[in-house]
Image: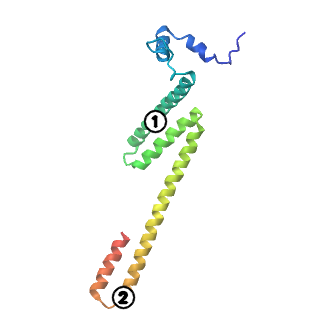
Amino acid sequence: MENPDKPPRAEAKLKNLDEDQLQVLWDLRYKDSGKINKTLRAITLSRFYTWLRLKREWEEDAAIADQAKNEWLQERPDATAEDLMRVGQLKFTAQSIKRGDDKAFVRLMRAITAREKAATDREKAADARLTKVEAGLDALYQEIQGNAAALKAYHAMKEALKQ
């Protein structure tokens, strides 16, 4: 008696294809000449179908993520591009995890961490640049004491720096 929990062997599934589908497989393997297409071996097909399955899953996940972004935008017309990207990425990752692709979550977390680090680095660089400019203005202030026109220009620069 056959075990119902055991999936059928791969070739058993192929043997049950209709004639048109069998012909397509034959043509891929043997082309028109009847000679074996050496570039199309079983391992090639196995890798191809693995890739094709992943490609289709990613396309489906991307479509679901796009739909989530559109729904988010309809509910929140003032949403930023970053908000939409975050919603789409979370939905895409949720779909991947639901499918059992835990690596997608790890990749997402790495991408988020890298993006946050880049933003922090940009802020630190901007703060350092601002600190240097303020230090320069402070030194300039010491030099222009008593010069009304220079002090007026100094205060204008200081105001511009605040904005």
Query: For the point 45% across and 35% down, which residue is it?
Result: 62
Disc 1 residue type (three-letter): Ala
Is residue 129 shown above or below 54?
below
Q: Residue furthest left?
A: 149
Q: Residue furthest right?
A: 1
State which quadrant residue 154 falls in: bottom left
Query: For the point 58% across and 40% down, which residue is it?
Result: 103
The residue that mark 1 highlights is 62
Toward the viewer: 127 or 77? 127
The crowding category of the residue bearing disc 1, from other C-alpha atoms within 10 Å (few below 14, some 14 to 19, many at least 20), is: some
Residue 71 is situated, as x and y percent measured from the top left of the image, at 41, 38
Q: CA distance from mark 1 to mark 2?
A: 61 Å
The residue that mark 2 highlights is 143
Mark 1: secondary structure: helix
Is 133 placed left or right of 58 in the picture?
Answer: left
Residue 83 is situated, as x and y percent measured from the top left of the image, at 44, 48
Assign the N terminus to one quadrant of the image: top right
